[in-house]
Image: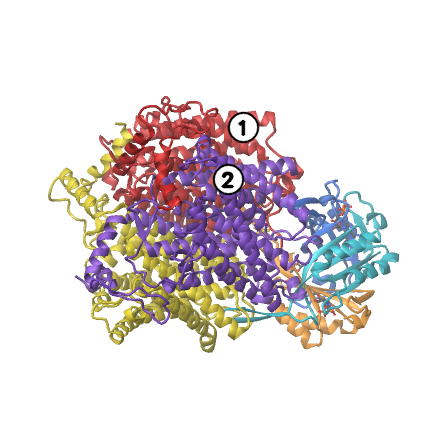
Chain colours: A yellow, B purple, C red, D orange, E cyan, F blue
Amino acid sequence: MTFKTWSRAGLPALLGAVALALPALAQDAAPAAGPGPAEAMAAAVQTAASTVNKGDVAWMMTSSLLVLLMIVPGLALFYGGLVRAKNMLSILMQVLTICAVMMVIWVLYGYSLAFNGGNAFIGDFGKAFLAGVTPESLSDTFTKGVQIPEYVFICFQMTFAAITPALAIGAFAERIKFPVVILFSILWATFVYFPIAHMVWGANGYLLTRGALDFAGGTVVHINAGIAGLVGAIIAGKRIGFGTEQLPPHSLVMTLIGAGLLWVGWFGFNVGSNLEANAFAGLVMINTFVATAGAVLGWLVIEWLVRGKPSMLGGVSGAIAGLVAITPACGSAGPLGAIVLGAVAGIVCFFFCTTVKNAFGYDDSLDVFGVHGVGGILGAIATGIVVSPALGGVGKDGYDMATQVMIQAEGVAITLLWSGIASVIIFTILKIIFGLRPTAAVEREGLDINEHGERAYHS
Amino acid sequence: MTFKTWSRAGLPALLGAVALALPALAQDAAPAAGPGPAEAMAAAVQTAASTVNKGDVAWMMTSSLLVLLMIVPGLALFYGGLVRAKNMLSILMQVLTICAVMMVIWVLYGYSLAFNGGNAFIGDFGKAFLAGVTPESLSDTFTKGVQIPEYVFICFQMTFAAITPALAIGAFAERIKFPVVILFSILWATFVYFPIAHMVWGANGYLLTRGALDFAGGTVVHINAGIAGLVGAIIAGKRIGFGTEQLPPHSLVMTLIGAGLLWVGWFGFNVGSNLEANAFAGLVMINTFVATAGAVLGWLVIEWLVRGKPSMLGGVSGAIAGLVAITPACGSAGPLGAIVLGAVAGIVCFFFCTTVKNAFGYDDSLDVFGVHGVGGILGAIATGIVVSPALGGVGKDGYDMATQVMIQAEGVAITLLWSGIASVIIFTILKIIFGLRPTAAVEREGLDINEHGERAYHS
Amino acid sequence: MTFKTWSRAGLPALLGAVALALPALAQDAAPAAGPGPAEAMAAAVQTAASTVNKGDVAWMMTSSLLVLLMIVPGLALFYGGLVRAKNMLSILMQVLTICAVMMVIWVLYGYSLAFNGGNAFIGDFGKAFLAGVTPESLSDTFTKGVQIPEYVFICFQMTFAAITPALAIGAFAERIKFPVVILFSILWATFVYFPIAHMVWGANGYLLTRGALDFAGGTVVHINAGIAGLVGAIIAGKRIGFGTEQLPPHSLVMTLIGAGLLWVGWFGFNVGSNLEANAFAGLVMINTFVATAGAVLGWLVIEWLVRGKPSMLGGVSGAIAGLVAITPACGSAGPLGAIVLGAVAGIVCFFFCTTVKNAFGYDDSLDVFGVHGVGGILGAIATGIVVSPALGGVGKDGYDMATQVMIQAEGVAITLLWSGIASVIIFTILKIIFGLRPTAAVEREGLDINEHGERAYHS
Amino acid sequence: MKIVMAIIKPFKLEEVRDALTGIGVHGLTVTEVKGYGRQKGHTEIYRGAEYAVSFLPKLKIEVAVAADQVSKVVEAITASAKTGQIGDGKIFVFAIDHAVRIRTGEVDADAL
Amino acid sequence: MKIVMAIIKPFKLEEVRDALTGIGVHGLTVTEVKGYGRQKGHTEIYRGAEYAVSFLPKLKIEVAVAADQVSKVVEAITASAKTGQIGDGKIFVFAIDHAVRIRTGEVDADAL
Amino acid sequence: MKIVMAIIKPFKLEEVRDALTGIGVHGLTVTEVKGYGRQKGHTEIYRGAEYAVSFLPKLKIEVAVAADQVSKVVEAITASAKTGQIGDGKIFVFAIDHAVRIRTGEVDADAL
Ligand SMILES: Nc1ncnc2c1ncn2[C@@H]1O[C@H](COP(=O)(O)OP(=O)(O)O)[C@@H](O)[C@H]1O
Ligand SMILES: Nc1ncnc2c1ncn2[C@@H]1O[C@H](COP(=O)(O)OP(=O)(O)O)[C@@H](O)[C@H]1O
Ligand SMILES: Nc1ncnc2c1ncn2[C@@H]1O[C@H](COP(=O)(O)OP(=O)(O)O)[C@@H](O)[C@H]1O
């Protein structure tokens, strides 16, 4: 047996003996007590063998990567294509940096706050620095007796935490200072994302115990980010030139690439939330396919009727609206319900992003609230409807449509209030301390050259 | 047990009791008779447990996503990069819309027509609206006793249906009205794609029972789309400026991105067609890798010899030609046979797209026939050769090269005739009723601004 | 049973009887002796059933595709965005062609030289032309009793061979003749890559038996390519205009897309190197996530401090530096160690690419040595440190930090010397015979138009 | 007839166009240019390479007008393109012999 | 010597070039410009934002010729660039003092 | 006052700019253009389609200077833009009536 072969085969055995490496950093490391490492290991392997299926592991790792693909390059391009060329890199940089920062704080305390112990509203610091997590640690799935490695679960959920603040920044694109965007993300994740994630997904989370249906995190991710973005857009104020100059997307091609990658990646998001590669995953998958298709058609048909021309930006906006709306419902609806939900989401978001938004006059640069907020609210509430067996949904024990819709609405309201109020506070503090916006000259000339010292394109 | 955990764990049990949600829409819903839901469910889970492997489910879901990646952004970019900037969005929009439309009609009646019952040439409406399909429904693989969830099979095949008409539109790019392209796709899918898919893949399909080898759908997808595109290109006539003005690709970079994603995604297409993540999948995979490599080299060497310079567009054109050619053969050839088949495909398609096409003088804008049609025909026929054990192929019961080549040629001929004739009829009808082309002024100025009211790039 | 169903079910049985198809080509085909094909087959299937897990197959196939995604479009775009527009296609073409060429020679003799028999420094030709490999052949994993199909292993390793020479070419981008680049790749792969891969991964490889830790090939791939690139850059000399004219990246957007795809694909590289979708894979995955995050932050913070502005190119350069550094360490470090290693890699590579490189004054066009070489050396050595259980690493039998660091350093030194000296010889020979560089007029005007007869962009 | 050629800051285009239509000038041609002058540029940094960028994006506007309109046009442009910051640009006026409208063949004053 | 400067529709470039070489003019310089004039533009819509686009893509051609060739050149351009549709463009002619060929230092007529 | 307009090879820009600042000229405007002339172009091939590309990338430089500086400027450009190869470009000089600095309203010599 060569050394290398040995070292890998033997690693799991060794790991049982490894206590947390950096005890000074760990707030609450699990004591490495009990049976000696070798026995512990044997037991762990035994357990792993009996409850972990490699097909699930393969799928959950794939799903984690699909969500990463949604962030960079997916979301970065989707948003980047919509701004002017002079601010392209600022968007790419914000998305990349937020992604990196969130991953680090996820390991430091985010995972623990979201998923470990605590009360109905927030977790605790018991797994800060991933204290006590080893390759043998397992996480439950929704099926009794089926588990996945905890590191895989941590990776999967880490990608959710990484994308959510990045979604919000589209609302105030092209006009906020880079350090402020990053500080906002850290504060907002800490005081909004981790608590709401805990409420929806934590073992004893408030919304979970209330009975709210949210298969893949429509509330946690989309409504949450949508309202935070709207608050930021309003507090920051409009872009220079908004309403007077032309601010067209600089490359709808990048937006299409981003949208395509978001669609592909969203299956990691939705079907990954099933935590298993089982037969039920197939239903989640087809719903995610056809709701999107329905929403593309919904937006383009209504735009064609109202505006006279169906646009490609409309088509991809519809796709995202449909994906947002099916996110909470993807494990509840049937395929026909999903198509209808998607189509309705396409139409409703179209009206919001055109008529309603223009009536209010605020400058949500990339329609984060109009697509993620509105689509998310619609999806969350509609989940209470399309779950109905009478509409082809999968049903729910003791299901009553009115009751369920009320439960769903409660989840929406709590998220809107919590995220909205906290965002007002965070942005106001940042505005007072640092100021949110660069100088007018900098904004005019573009954030790329001024904040990052580079330009996106040279001929 | 929290509600959420319960609701997911309990969903499968509930599902057994769920009849089709929208009976008014369903033509032929399976009656929910027999044993009560709970028992049925128990049985279903039992069966699922014994015949469904989560590794297969993980792979087939991954494969479905890989094919989606081929469509948006893959094919959209590959084609989009080859047109002029003023028509970029029109291509992206056509591919996106066709994808969405096909997914919806796949659920409505396409899947049923292609895969449910019927005769040797077409299925029936028994599973229209996916009537009777539940998360417990299973589909057979090629191995006795191994099944995959039917929803997963439906998703996988849905992506094939979505890409095929989108392939065809490259032949008449830059000059057809958007609504006409969409109508064509719907009619062509209904009268050509679903029947041919049924003939090749349906349990009792004509070509299947004849013994034609077509592992991943070279006939159904590539020959089929190639001839449809050619017919469209001829009936629509040449682009304004063809032969007199320069019509260079506006961004070969987009074409490279698209080609790369097509290559990556094609493994979903080819290896996914194996329906299992078993050892045989490895052969399909290596063939798909090396045939492409061979074809890149085939095209670039012949171009270097004939033209004096190897071009990047040549390299990626070769890659696609190789992928097309190996599609039917990927489960029949050995790796050396695959390299040779790829190289030959690169060379043959090079000659077709340069010499032959120019001799005929028609305007197949993006060489859909030259690559997909010609490469597909070559691959289909060559499959009868490279399957030969004497050439490293996997062989076939009672194999005789001449016989097999004739069987393969029959499949090619039927597809060319069926798709060709139906396409003539469809395009002629559309031409008479709506006219195929926009005004000359619109074509000059570009489809993006005129048909979709937007432009791809702003500086 | 339809023919098609039969043909697939029956293929494996037939395959047992298939000897290598092209015996004239095969140097050392395994004789198809022993038990008759049918029995052999039955045994093979038996074995396969008992040691191959479909979850592993699914993951390893996914991993192979992820590495392909790293090459085209990933690396092609990452590098392409950094050159001037006039040389864009030359980069895309070099990466594509190298990928294709390497795949073909991998099948012809590369796999055999790297992984079959031989001595401590190089394999033999026993599996040239993949002689004797069938769908039933299996490869060992690191777990006793767990195997994967050999074709899948061949595909996975093929992608490593395909990317490595393509990494090197960034160092002498924009100034070497296309045929010379391709010849270099073939010679270098043969005399450097295959031997070093054998030394690190081969059953009896020198470095493996010495006890060097290199989980996913930091030595074989990154140090190896980095030093080769540096040698090429120095022997070729500087680009015209280097130091006097501005040579800015023509599209940092392409570079971001490439970086994102490299990150996503790198999980195939690192986690795929685990060869199984088991619990340990989760550790490799989280390390690959967070080391990258740490490196993004490391580079941007140090750049912010030193240069006054954090740049997006800095962020993505950091990401790649972190990925390079964690490559050897991803199966040894713990997540906190990975974050720190990433951050250090970001900082060290920043200083190298800015201060050190400028002090030396050579023209490594795309900082291949500064990122892959330096990051690779750092990662290789640091692996000996972060593996320490005291630092949260997974430990190693009889681990002693100083000893292990020395072993790691030995691996680095051997690779630097072997690859460095061989690269000097290869480039010198190519320079004498063909000359490395095009004429000054060609270099001025761009390689795209002169070597490939096309331009990347037309408006 | 004269051509008034102005180099302006890019974001001023709409204002200048409006100012010109305000005084009855309904045709103009715009070119994207790069300007070098007193206005200082930036340093761009791409890893180890630092580039001082002294050429800044500007727009060149060309308006052909009758000679007697020149001063009005120059005034309109000056007023609308001015920010008071360095780099606002220049106006140059030069004479043309001849103007033709391609569509109709009309010449000189009629061609504008 | 004069410069004949023409604003034309982009797709007419090859025809104009051919017309000019037809009359023995073998050098010209082309610039991508945007034109504003009588030809109406489009409305572009990006989700909720509507932009009236009044600047249309045109090409500017500059040809330096001896004074006695001007009318031939103007005619050739007019004939080849004309579609008869609004927006065909304009031709402006102005005098130059001096021409130099950089490569050789030849001046004036010899420089063209 | 005059405008010296030069068509040069793109990679000569920095040298020309330096030559001009060397003689005290601190303002200029640059436009990307395509030139057609004696310098032969390329053939581009995209699968079956072959295009002869006769327009080559050039830069146009425009410098407004006092009349008495023209010859110095022309010399500086000629010297710095010259490679001796075909396609080095041309210099054209023409008179302007009037120059204005938008920021200050200064005119003529003061405006440059
Ligand atoms: N001598 C000149 N000839 C041609 N263009 C000039 C000249 N001087 C300046 N310009 C143009 O005018 C622009 C503005 O000039 P600059 O000196 O920066 O500021 P200001 O207009 O405030 O004097 C420059 O970017 C350049 O395009
Ligand atoms: N006064 C002008 N000065 C400079 N360019 C002009 C002027 N008027 C028109 N142009 C240019 O000529 C183009 C065509 O003019 P337009 O009024 O649209 O149509 P037509 O050429 O048929 O009169 C415009 O797009 C613009 O580029
Ligand atoms: N008559 C002309 N009018 C305007 N521009 C011209 C003329 N002749 C040449 N040019 C410009 O000068 C450039 C160089 O001219 P060319 O004939 O190729 O070489 P050379 O400058 O060595 O004579 C051309 O690409 C074109 O842009």
Q: Which residue is mark 2?
A: B405
Left or right for C236, reference B220: right
Q: Is residue B210 left or right of residue C216?
A: right
Residue C378: quadrant of the picture: top left
User: Horizontal and vertical percent for residue C205?
Assistant: 35, 26
Q: Position of residue A167 (x, y in %)?
A: 39, 61
Up/down of B168 relative to F46, above or below: below
Q: Quadrant of the C terminus of chain C?
A: bottom right
- Viewer-proximal residue, C122 or A97? C122
User: Which corner quadrant of the image does residue A189 belong to?
Assistant: bottom left
How many angstroms separate mark 2 from mark 1 (CA)?
A: 48 Å
**Chain to which the residue tagged by mark 1 belongs:** C
Residue D44 makes an appearance in the image: no
Q: Is residue C230 visible?
A: yes
Q: Quadrant of ligand 2?
A: bottom right
Q: From this view, report whether residue C402 is shown above or below residue F48.
A: above
Which residue does the numbered mark 1 point to in the structure image?
C427
Q: Amino acid at mark 2?
A: Val
Q: Nearer the viewer, residue C85 or B139?
A: B139
Determine if marks 2 and 1 fall on one subunit.
no
Q: Where in the figure is residue A10, as x and y percent of width and height?
A: 22, 35
